[in-house]
Amino acid sequence: MSAALPEVDAQALFRYVLRLGDLSLILGQRLGEWVGHSPALEEDLGVANIALDLIGQARLLLTYAGEVEGRGRDEDKLAFLREQGAYFNAILAEQPNGDFGQTIVRQVLIDAFQLELYERMADSLDARLAAIAAKSAKEVRYHLRYSSGWLVRLGDGTEESHAKVQSALELLWPYTVELFAEDDLDRMMADAGIAPRLSEVHAAWVRRLDPILAEATLRRPTDRPHAWHGKRGQHSEHLGYILAEMQYLQRAYPDARW
């Protein structure tokens, strides 16, 4: 735990950092499913590079979380040896890829969120988190440029491509509510100067998304009440399948090393 923040409970900071790491970890795993299946070689490489960036962010965050926890769990143990209820990613990240357009919609929504969050977290009073956020913001800025470029091409493309991405936007938009649903942990981190207020992040997220959606000729759906609490460890059935694949080797061969 950062020496500059003695008043923050270590368990709370541990769980908050896990939220950040798990979002990148699970989204990176989802994007990895496209390797060898993307619509073109260039996109295969583009999506794979974004997945690698996300896994890299997850490694930094999970390593820090393990140090804060102080129980000897490193990034591998935290990534591969937790049960489903001990992951705290927002449920949007675990939603199925669907077609390429649906993947792009999910990516734009999360990219815009991470960019606004990390740009503000670069000023965190937690020096370790500030450094990770500053590095991650540079990567996510590229991710959003890639995903938003594709969203515009598909949304303002053919009648069929427009209809598909609009449908994907309607399907996935309700899950975005959870990203900004502030709970006691979010408030604690904001009060301590560790994280930004989610209300500020949400306002900036909308400002960033609106011109992208307008250029893509897409309608922004209205917010609806949500019943998903991935940030609390309550997940959809999709996460179980992700973990079954992701954790297989570690569980089959505990502590194996290359």
Image: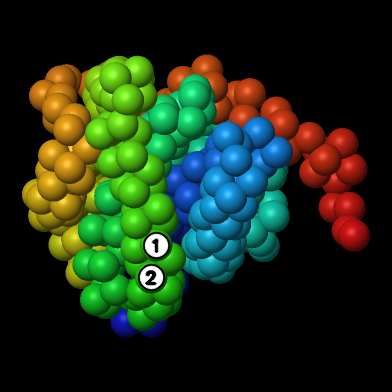
- Crowd tier of the residue under label 1, counting other residues whose Cα lies within 10 Å: few below 14, some 14–19, many 20 or above: some
Label 2 belongs to which residue? 138
Q: Can the viewer see residue 220?
A: yes
Who is closer to the viewer here, 36 or 160? 160
Would you say the residues marked 1 and 2 are in contact, meaning their CB atoms lie under 8 Å apart? yes
Residue positioned most to the front: 158
In front: mark 1 or mark 2?
Answer: 1
Residue located at (72% from left, 31% from top)? 245
Q: Amino acid at mark 1?
A: Tyr
Q: Quadrant of the N terminus?
A: bottom left
- Distance of label 1 from label 2 (alpha carbons): 7 Å
Image position of 199 (left or right of 152):
left
Report how many numbered discs are placed on residues in the image: 2
> What residue is drawn where x is 29% and y is 19%?
159
Q: Secondary structure at mark 1?
A: helix
From this view, report whether residue 148 is shown above or below residue 216.
below
Q: Where, by quadrant of the figure, is residue 175 drawn?
A: top left
Left or right for 241, reference 152 = right
Q: Residue at x 69, y 55 (%)?
A: 76
